[in-house]
Image (spheres, helix red, strand yellow):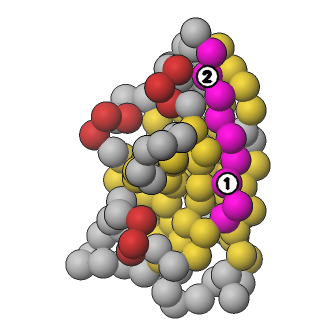
Amino acid sequence: QVQLVESGGGSVQAGGSLRLSCVMSGYTSSSACMAWFRQAPDKEREGVASIYRGGGWTWIAESMKGRFAISQNNARSTVYLQMNGLKPEDTAMYYCAAGPLSGGACDLYPDKYNNWGQGTQITVSS
């Protein structure tokens, strides 16, 4: 059973930075990908970034390129989301997820992921 625990959320002013962490335990063959998603009130869950744990390949949602980056530790048990230049529209609950490779990539579609953390809230004030 894969378990994911996020941390690092909080409140920050616009332009600030935060780094989220997601610790994974109970690795299985169906958790080759780890990803971050976010969901704002009354909005659908959207993909932010993903990483292939085996090779370190990363994908970033187009609207977040240049501001957000995903990485993992050497043990490949913790995934980080570095967020810079935060904007009020980045306010959301951020979730860590684990899932299998899909067509050789770690897609940013929520239905591709079968394990989810509880989420951590990010609030960006203007």
Tell me which amino acid carries mark 2. Val
In the picture, the disc for residue 124 is 2
Query: Looking at this view, is 75 or 36 the one in front?
Result: 36
Label 2 Cα crowd, 10 Å radius (few <14 / some 14-19 / many 20+): many
Helix, strand or loop status at disc 1:
loop
Quarter of image, res 18: top right
Label 1 Cα crowd, 10 Å radius (few <14 / some 14-19 / many 20+): many
Vertical comparison of 95 with 8: above or below = below
Q: CA distance from mark 1 to mark 2?
A: 16 Å
Is residue 120 rendered magenta in the image?
yes
Quarter of image, res 110: bottom left
Magenta: main secondary structure equals: strand
Decide if residue 83 is on the left or right side of residue 58.
Answer: right
Residue 59 in the image, given as x and y percentages of width and height: 35, 53
User: Which stretch appears magenta?
Assistant: 117-125
The residue pinned by badge 1 equals: 119
Decide if residue 110 is on the left or right side of residue 115.
Answer: left
Decide if residue 63 is on the left or right side of residue 91.
Answer: left
Query: Looking at this view, is 70 or 107 the one in front?
Result: 107
Residue 45 in the image, given as x and y percentages of width and height: 45, 53
**Residue at figure coordinates x 71%, y 76% from the top left:** 3
Is residue 113 rendered magenta in the image?
no
Quadrant containing the N terminus is bottom right
- Residue extending furthest toward the left: 103
Helix, strand or loop status at disc 2:
strand
Vertical comparison of 15 with 30: above or below = above
